[in-house]
Every structure is written in C-alpha cells, then in structure tokens.
Amino acid sequence: MPVSAVVFDFFGTLTPSTPSHVWDDHAARSAAPLGIPVETWRAALDVSFPERAIGALGGLTETFRELVRRCGHDVDEAALAAACAARMTAQRELFLLRDDAVKTLTEIRARGLPVGVLSDCSAELAESWLSLPLAELVDGVVLSCEVGRRKPDPELFALIAARLGAVPQECLYVGDGGGHELTGASSCGMTAYMLRAHDWAGNDAHSRETDWSGPAVRSLSEVLDLL
C-alpha cells in the first residue's frame, strides 16, 4: 500500500545519538544537589527506566523523590527541587534536533502526509513537549509515559497510526532501533526503516535491536526518497 503517514522515533532519530558519557554527565548534575554518589544515582536512573517510561513513578518531582528513597537517602525538598531543575536543563539539551530534521519533516508535510512521533520517554519530554519547536511540525504524538505502555507494545503503533488518521499498514516508521521498535512496527504492519546515521554506533539506548536486518537509511533526508 502507498505511504499515507510517516512516524518517527524521537531520541537518537530526530535527535542526535547520546553516548554513555553524556548520560554520566547528566546524572552527575542531578546527583550533586542530592549528595548521592554519581554511580549510585546513574544506576538508579537506569534501573528505573522501565517504570519511568510508562509513567509509573509520576512526574519528575515524584520520580526523583522515590529514587532518592531507593538510594537510601532522606529527601530534602530544596535539594530535590535543585536536582529536578538540573535534570530538566540537562534533558533539554537532548531535545535539539538533527540538522536535517526540520527540513525533512517540513517537506513530508508539504507533500500532504501527516507526521507522527512515537517515543519511549520519561516525564521530562512530556512536560516539555508543547514548548518544543518540533511540536508545530508534528500532527500526532504518542509518549510512552503518558499512555502507560512501552515499545514494542502493538497498542502504541496502532495508537499513533490512528492519531494520524491512518492504519499501520499505510505507515512508514523510522527509528534507531531502541526498545525493539522496528520489530514492533513491522509486526503491526508498518514499513520499518532503521536510521543508521553516522553517530549510530555511539548511541547508548535501552534494548536497541542491533541485529536488525531490515532496510535502513543513513540520514533523515533519505526518508524523502522512500515516499
């Protein structure tokens, strides 16, 4: 069937890849006000991602309060607020788009095709979404922490297709492979392409399907050639 909608992953796809040392730096920034060792705090963030990605721990403040408790520390509200502010500042640095993202999304919409974003994410992206320039270039968005499901849950792919006024079989899906998203999209009938950009190998992503043998593109601009 012809493509009638295009769905993108967010982190590592519309945004540049994030290597491990960046996550370490971000963890250090929010650990400092709390007085928690960076390694302990980074581990708490990593282990809790499955919960944070489905919104199980609440918003950022509630999430950090719970993680501080799990690390065996007492919660100081002033320190907690400072840690949350540091986290939001760090996360916003990750919301910057690839150089060809705006041009690609704008051209897709100019061709009459709706654009969607489907992201496994925690509260930081959800709380920032409406203020991002990207929001004006997207016709439908599904954020895992808002709907309580993670990739490759088929309900997510069905939901983003519906929000774009399409069926999965009419959707092109593009992602870096995190969360087994490409297999999930394909299983639901979408045509899935991996974005294997120049920085792909250095990306530190959860459950990325590095063994994907399906089709791939090297840049977001190449997606236009698929339409």
Image: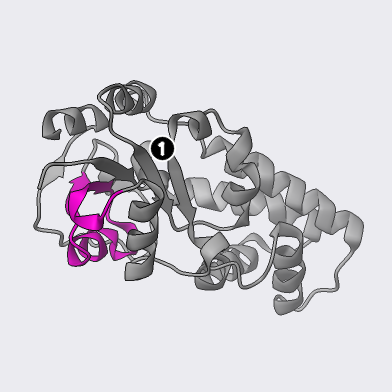
Quick check: is 179 in the magenta stretch? yes
Residue found 50% across the figure and 71% down from its top: 50
Q: Is residue 17 visible?
A: no
Q: Amino acid at mark 1?
A: Thr
Residue 147 visible (yes or no): yes
User: Residue 146 location in percent, x, y?
Assistant: 57, 61
Q: Residue at x 33, y 53 (%)?
A: 161
Q: Position of residue 157 (x, y in %)?
A: 33, 60
Residue at disc 1, secondary structure: loop
Above or below, comparing residue 36 to residue 202 in the picture: below
Which residue position is annotated with label 1?
15
- The picture places residue 135, in percent across and down from the top left corner, at 52, 34
Q: Could you tell me which residue is drawn at 15 percent across and 33 percent down?
A: 227
Most extreme residue toward the front, as rendered? 165
Q: State left or right for residue 145 relative to residue 172.
A: right
Is residue 120 toward the left or the right of residue 91 in the image? left
Image coordinates for residue 45, horizontal then vertical, percent? 58, 65
Q: How many marks on residues?
A: 1
Image height of 219 relative to 186, above or below: above
125 sits to left or right of 60 = left
Between 181 and 218, the one nearer to me in the picture: 181
Magenta segment boundaries in residue numbering: 166-195
